C-alpha cells in the first residue's frame, strides 16, 4: 500500500485497474482477487500526496469507477480506501469527506501512513474508518499560516463546524469541533489516532 512501511497485499492477488499520477499526488485503483465477491474481486483505492483540486478530481474519478463487491448472501463488502497525506486544502478535505459519506468505502490509514490536515478532515467524514498499527491521523487547521481555517475567526470555522455536525451527529460533532478549537494553535495538531 502506498505510503505504508509494511502493509500490503500479495502481488499475485492484485491487478492495477488504473493509476493517476499528478505533480503532488498519486491515486491507484486495484482489484484484489476475493472469492467472497460474486464478481471475484474487491476494489482497493490508494491515495498518497497533497489534497488539492486536481487530486480531488482524480480521486472522484476513481471512486466513481469502483465495482461493488456483493457476497453470495447479498451483503456488500465495502472497498478499502487507503489515505496517506500530510497536507492539503481543508475545504477540499471537507468535500472529500462528504464523498466518503456517499460511497461504500472504508477509509484506512495503515501502518506507517500519515493522514494530516485536509486528510484528517476527510477521514472524519467517512462512515467506515480505521487506523492500523502505526498509522496516524492528525488534525491541523493551519489558519495562522495562511492555509486552512483561522480559529480566531468564527466565520472561518463555520464550514468545519457544520461539516462535523452533519457527518458525525450533534453530540459527536460538537465534541470534535471543541477539541479542534482546543488544539487549533498547537504546532503538533490533535492526534486522533
Image (cartoon, rainbow, N blue to C red):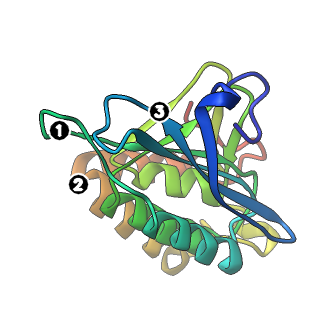
Q: Point out the frontmost of discs 1 and 2.
A: 1
Tag 3, which secondary structure? strand
The answer to whether the residue labelled 1 contacts the one labelled 2, judged by CB atoms less than 8 Å apart, is: no
To which residue does mark 2 refer?
A: 170
Vertical placement of residue 145 versus 6, above or below = below
Q: CA distance from mark 2 to mark 3?
A: 21 Å
**In this view of the protein, which residue sits in the foreground, 102 or 182?**
102
**In this view of the protein, which residue sits in the foreground, 155 or 18?**
18
- Horizontal side, residue 25 vs residue 58: left or right: right
Q: Point out the frontmost of discs 2 and 3.
A: 3
Q: What residue is rendered at 28% in x and 63% in y?
A: 166
To which residue does mark 3 refer?
A: 130
Q: What residue is rendered at 32% in x and 37% in y?
A: 37
**Mark 2 surroundings: few (<14), some (14-19) or many (≥20) residues within 10 A:** few
Mark sitting earlier along the chain (1/2): 1
To which residue does mark 1 refer?
A: 75
- Horizontal side, residue 20 vs residue 162: left or right: right
- Horizontal side, residue 176 vs residue 111: left or right: left
Mark sitting earlier along the chain (3/1): 1
Q: CA distance from mark 3 to mark 1?
A: 21 Å
Res 155 seen here: yes
Amino acid at each position: 500500500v502506498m505510503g505504508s512501511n509494511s502493509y500490503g497485499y500479495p502481488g499475485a492477488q492484485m491487478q492495477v485497474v488504473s493509476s493517476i499520477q499528478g505533480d503532488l499526488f498519486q491515486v491507484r485503483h486495484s482489484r484484489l482477487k476475493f472469492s467472497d465477491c460474486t464478481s471475484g474481486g474487491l476494489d482497493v483505492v490508494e491515495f498518497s500526496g497533497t489534497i488539492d483540486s486536481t487530486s480531488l478530481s482524480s480521486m472522484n474519478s476513481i471512486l466513481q469507477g469502483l465495482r461493488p463487491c456483493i457476497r453470495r448472501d447479498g451483503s456488500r463488502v465495502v472497498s478499502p480506501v487507503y489515505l496517506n497525506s500530510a497536507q492539503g486544502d481543508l475545504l477540499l478535505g471537507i468535500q472529500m469527506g462528504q464523498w466518503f459519506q456517499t460511497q461504500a468505502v472504508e477509509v484506512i490509514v495503515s501502518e506507517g501512513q500519515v493522514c494530516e490536515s485536509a486528510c484528517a478532515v476527510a477521514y472524519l467524514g467517512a462512515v467506515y474508518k480505521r487506523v492500523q498499527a502505526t498509522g496516524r491521523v492528525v488534525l491541523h487547521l493551519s489558519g495562522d499560516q495562511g492555509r486552512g481555517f483561522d480559529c480566531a475567526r468564527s466565520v472561518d470555522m463555520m464550514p468545519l463546524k457544520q461539516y462535523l455536525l452533519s457527518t458525525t451527529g450533534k453530540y459527536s460533532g460538537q465534541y470534535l469541533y471543541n477539541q479542534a478549537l482546543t488544539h487549533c494553535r498547537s504546532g503538533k495538531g490533535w492526534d486522533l489516532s
